[in-house]
Image (cartoon, helix red, strand yellow):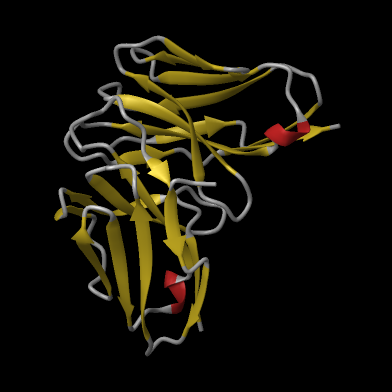
Amino acid sequence: DTEVTQTPKHLVMGMTNKKSLKCEQHMGHRAMYWYKQKAKKPPELMFVYSYEKLSINESVPSRFSPECPNSSLLNLHLHALQPEDSALYLCASSQELGMGNQPQHFGDGTRLSIL
Amino acid sequence: KQEVTQIPAALSVPEGENLVLNCSFTDSAIYNLQWFRQDPGKGLTSLLLIQSSQREQTSGRLNASLDKSSGRSTLYIAASQPGDSATYLCAVRGSSNTGKLIFGQGTTLQVKP
């Protein structure tokens, strides 16, 4: 069992749909991350939140919209996605951005398929 | 631009063997290096984190070393078991402020009974 919980585990959506991915952690971590992982490839960073504020956006298209409503929750809102956006979306958390001696903890991901 | 390379891409060994996975990075100015395990269809499990000032870290049958000056890290797995079969990823963090991890492509390990 992971300490970072992601829902749903699987999501199939059409290109015109709007959906959201959710991530929750109760470890008191103040840094949270979204990564995208294509098949047979390593994860790539999308967004970083620190103390509920967006710290990094890795030039991600606006059809992906992150939100951090509180210190335990991280959402990724999806709208008008493209077939190439099909991937495993991973959420991670760590104690604080500045604490480099603390590992990032990952959830099991949401496998997203765009029809 | 930091690049992380893992060799070999795949490895198959009989149960009980000791093995070494390799990770190299092009920019030695790293903050830390983290080894992960990923099972098929699952997320990443953190195995070991080595800070730039450290030379090695150990956890059970796992030992990770870091030679920052040469841009290399190794993950040593002792007495391998079928349950060790997974993809192993190394990731470097270049700055304390961003939290951004740069991952290698991974080594897929199969341990045969």
- State the residue at coordinates (37%, 90%): A16
Tell me where residue B103 appears, x and y as whole percent. Answer: 42, 40
**Residue A89 visible within the image:** no
Q: Residue A62: give x, y in percent of width and height.
A: 22, 73
Q: Residue furthest top?
A: B55
Compared with B57, A95 (above or below) is below
Q: Quadrant of the C terminus of chain B?
A: top right
A62 sits to left or right of A22: left
Total labels: the figure holds 0
Q: Position of residue A4 (x, y in %)?
A: 42, 50
Query: Outermost residue toward the right?
Result: B113
Examine the rendering and report whether any part of residue B24 can be seen: yes
Q: Is residue A109 above or below residue B34?
A: below
Residue for point 21% across, 61% down:
A68
Residue at horizontal 55%, vertical 58%?
A39
Q: Quadrant of residue B111?
A: top right
Query: Which of these two is toward me, A48 or A2?
Result: A2
Residue A16 in the figure: left or right of residue B61: left
Answer left or right for A95 relative to A1: left
Q: Position of residue A40 (x, y in %)?
A: 57, 53
Q: Residue at x 59, y 17 (%)?
A: B60
Which of the image's four quarters has the N terminus of chain B?
Answer: top left
Q: Left or right: A52 with respect to B99?
A: left
Instruction: Decide which of A8, B56 is in the foreground and name it.
Output: A8
